[in-house]
Image (cartoon, rainbow, N blue to C red):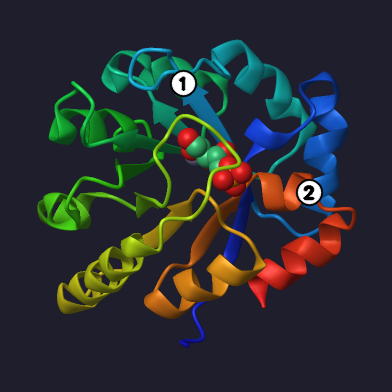
């Protein structure tokens, strides 16, 4: 395995929404640098979750990086609102209806980091032409829409292929994985070249948050 720094991004989709402030403080105190915020519109995915007002409200709780994963049909229309609410990093799906280059430009020209997301059925080479313009690629390791699903190990070759392409182009692009990440699947992802791990259920359902985050990092 490489000595690449591993960053943990707990998905608050698995948190207790009645106590978001303490849930966020708990994971940040335990060593999480990012907070993964899953935004779903009930159209791009068959579920509805967090929107702009929640992002705005939790922004005062922490300085951690707000990693907003937009699972919405028209992400370009909502970029400004999420940035105003406090997003630091905006990930949007290549399968969405928005123009990829235009959406990246809208995010980066506001001084924020842009990332592309691929669903399990989407080949990874779709993101290759955009690697120079983005900070991160998120490889979904479950079908987007719900927490608590099983990791799809068939996604591991995509991670390896992407890491090779990033190195071939001489770039510093993060590879994030999202879905079914736990103590066992995290090792597979890191070995394949991922360096930012999203985990919802594994972290928030663990009796010892610090131990769970330490295990994912190590
Ligand atoms: C799924 C979301 C994930 C989800 C991960 O659509 O994008 O971020 O919260 O949850 P776990 O870690 O429970 O699979
Ligand atoms: Zn997510």
- Mark carried by residue 86: none
Sooner in the amino-acid sequence: mark 2 or mark 1: 2
Q: Secondary structure at mark 1?
A: strand
Whole-number angstrom distance, CA of label 2 to CA of label 1: 22 Å
Query: What x and y, as percent, mark residue 145?
Result: 46, 29
> In the figure, residue 160 lies in which quadrant?
bottom left
Query: Which residue is painted at 22% across and 37% down in the image?
Result: 94
Which of 138/144 is in front?
144
For the image shown, how many numbered marks are present on the structure? 2
| Element under disc 2 | helix
Look at the numbered discs 2 and 1 and tell me whether their residues touch, using CB distance below 8 Å. no
Please state which of residues 73 and 47 is positioned toward the viewer in this rendering. Answer: 47
**Left or right of residue 132: residue 4:** right
Q: For ligand 1, tell me if the residue under mark 1 lies within 8 Å.
A: yes
On residue 27, the disc is: 2
Q: Which residue is mark 1?
A: 40
Residues 30 and 14: in front is 14
Q: Position of residue 117 (x, y in %)?
A: 32, 43
């Amino acid at each position: 395995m490489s000595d690449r720094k591993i960053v943990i991004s707990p998905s608050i989709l698995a948190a207790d929404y009645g106590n978001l402030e303490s849930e966020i403080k708990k994971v940040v105190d335990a060593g999480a640098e990012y907070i993964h915020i899953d935004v779903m519109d009930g159209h791009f995915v068959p579920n509805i979750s967090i929107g702009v007002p929640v992002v705005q409200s939790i922004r005062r709780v922490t300085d951690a990086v707000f990693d907003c994963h937009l699972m919405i049909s028209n992400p370009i229309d909502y970029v400004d609102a999420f940035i105003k609410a406090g997003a630091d990093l905006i990930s949007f799906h290549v399968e969405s209806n928005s123009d990829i280059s235009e959406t990246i430009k809208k995010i980066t020209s506001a001084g924020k980091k842009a990332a592309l997301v691929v669903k399990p059925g989407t080949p990874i080479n779709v993101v290759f032409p955009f690697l120079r313009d983005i900070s991160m690629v998120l490889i979904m390791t479950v079908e987007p829409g719900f927490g608590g699903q099983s990791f799809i190990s068939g996604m591991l070759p995509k991670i390896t292929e992407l890491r090779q392409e990033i190195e071939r182009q001489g770039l510093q692009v993060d590879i994030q994985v999202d879905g079914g990440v736990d103590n066992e699947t995290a090792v597979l992802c890191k070995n394949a070249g991922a360096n930012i791990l999203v985990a919802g259920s594994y972290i928030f359902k663990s009796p010892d948050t610090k131990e769970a985050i330490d295990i994912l990092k190590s």
